[in-house]
Image (cartoon, rainbow, N blue to C red):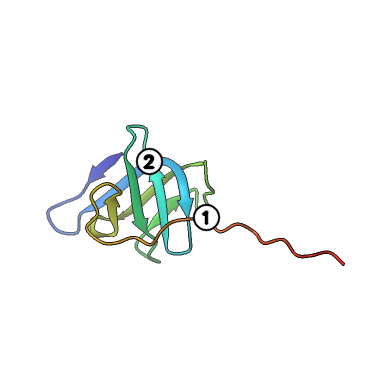
């Protein structure tokens, strides 16, 4: 995990593996065991690679208020469960 920024407009850069991703948030587990939940906000959040999947390495860039350690929340994230494709019945 890498933290950076100035007194105003602080930003975070979080590196780790994706443990869950939805249309509104991403959960990233860092090597030190810390899990971060980041709100995905267009124009504010960056993902590298741009379309990560569960289990892949990712770097997330975001504004400080949009991220939190999962153990010590400042806002309430939605329960995260990666959507699974639904099977269509064959005829």
Q: Residues within 10 Å of mark 1 (few under 14, many from 20)?
A: some
- Left or right, residue 73 beside residue 79: left
Camera-side residue of 27 and 10: 27
The reply to whether callout 2 and callout 1 are in contact (CB within 8 Å) is: no
> Which percent across, then down, holds residue 15?
37, 41
Residue 86, above or below 52: below
Q: CA distance from mark 2 to mark 1?
A: 19 Å
Camera-side residue of 3 and 16: 16
Identify the image quadrant of the N terminus. Answer: top left
Residue beneath disc 1: 82
**Mark 1 element type:** loop
Please tell me which residue is depicted at 50% across the width and 48% down the height of the picture: 49
Identify the image quadrant of the C terminus. Answer: bottom right
- Left or right, residue 77 beside residue 3: right
Camera-side residue of 89 and 69: 89
Picture quarter containing residue 35?
top left
> Which percent across, then down, holds residue 60?
38, 49
State the residue lying farthest toward the top: 32
Residue beneath disc 2: 15
Q: Judge depth for marks 2 and 1 and give the one in front.
A: 1
Please tell me which residue is depicted at 31% across the width and 46% down the height of the picture: 13
């Amino acid at each position: 995990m890498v933290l950076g920024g100035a007194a105003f407009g602080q930003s975070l850069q979080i590196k780790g593996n994706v443990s869950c991703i939805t249309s509104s948030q991403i959960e990233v587990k860092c090597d030190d065991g810390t899990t971060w939940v980041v709100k995905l906000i267009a124009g504010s959040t960056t993902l590298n690679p741009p379309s990560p999947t569960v289990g892949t390495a990712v770097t997330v860039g975001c504004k400080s208020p949009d991220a939190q350690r999962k153990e010590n929340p400042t806002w309430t994230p939605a329960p995260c469960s990666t959507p699974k494709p639904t099977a269509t019945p064959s005829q």
